[in-house]
Image (tube, helix red, strand yellow):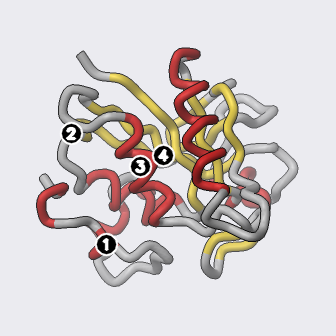
């Protein structure tokens, strides 16, 4: 039995590549979450008037990797105190967020973020919200860094410990 969680950590290429390498993750998919229009395109999302955020669907086996471990890995890849920015990517579509489709995940996520706040002097601005909608991104965005190994990525893909890799 698998579960799903959605992470927004700036450009979705790095977030997708990072989670795809984790043991227990069975599927990743780049897309757009929590916006106002139907089936947005990348160009529409970049205009910043759609409300969408670049997001990665992470389908995982909780018997192999618990949600808390996924949250720990996610926070390794972002600066949770910057609003609408990760790395060189700036704009509302690059805000950080954790979106859940299972209400039972909400208290786990909120508790984790509250505990994580103790590590920062600035407030964490990462959204923690229920998933309202999600549309897959165009095919060329899927597994982009596998297809383009020298592509831009603000995420250090070497941060994954060997024992956590597939």
Task: Give the mark nearer the N terminus: 1 vs 4.
Answer: 4
Disc 3 to disc 2, how far (Cα)?
24 Å
Task: Look at 38% across and 52% down and name the residue there.
Answer: 142
Quadrant of image for the N terminus: top left
Q: In the picture, residue 114 is in which quadrant?
A: top right
- Number of numbered labels in the structure image: 4
Residue at the spot of label 4 = 56
Residue at the spot of label 1 = 159
Residue at the spot of label 2 = 24
Task: Look at 69% across and 32% down and name the residue there.
Answer: 129
> Secondary structure under badge 4?
strand
Task: Give the mark nearer the N terminus: 1 vs 2.
Answer: 2
Q: Nearer the viewer, mark 1 or mark 4?
A: 1
Q: In the picture, residue 15 is in which quadrant?
A: bottom left
Q: Work out whether residue 104 or residue 115 is closer to the camera in this orientation and state it.
A: 115
Disc 4 to disc 3, how far (Cα)?
13 Å
Task: Give the mark nearer the N terminus: 3 vs 2.
Answer: 2
Task: Look at 78% across and 60% down and name the residue there.
Answer: 123
Q: Is residue 110 left or right of residue 19?
A: right
Residue at the spot of label 3 = 139
In the rendered view, tell whether residue 130 sits above or below residue 156.
above
Residue 147: x and y, percent?
28, 67
Q: Work out whether residue 70 or residue 1 is closer to the camera in this orientation and state it.
A: 70
């Amino acid at each position: 039995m698998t579960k799903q969680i959605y992470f927004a950590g700036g450009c979705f290429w790095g977030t997708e590549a990072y989670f795809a390498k984790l043991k227990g993750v069975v599927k990743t998919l780049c897309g757009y979450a929590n916006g106002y229009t139907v089936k947005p395109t990348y160009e529409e999302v970049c205009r910043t008037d759609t409300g969408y955020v670049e997001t990665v669907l992470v389908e995982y086996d909780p018997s192999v990797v618990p949600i808390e471990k996924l949250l720990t890995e996610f926070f390794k890849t972002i600066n949770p105190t910057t609003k609408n920015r990760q790395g060189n990517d700036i704009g509302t579509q690059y805000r950080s967020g954790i979106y859940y489709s299972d209400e039972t995940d909400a208290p786990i996520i909120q508790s984790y973020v509250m505990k994580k706040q103790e590590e920062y002097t600035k407030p964490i601005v990462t959204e923690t919200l229920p998933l309202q909608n999600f549309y897959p991104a165009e095919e060329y965005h899927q597994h982009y860094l596998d297809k383009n190994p020298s592509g831009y990525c603000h995420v250090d893909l070497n941060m994954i410990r060997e024992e956590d890799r597939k």
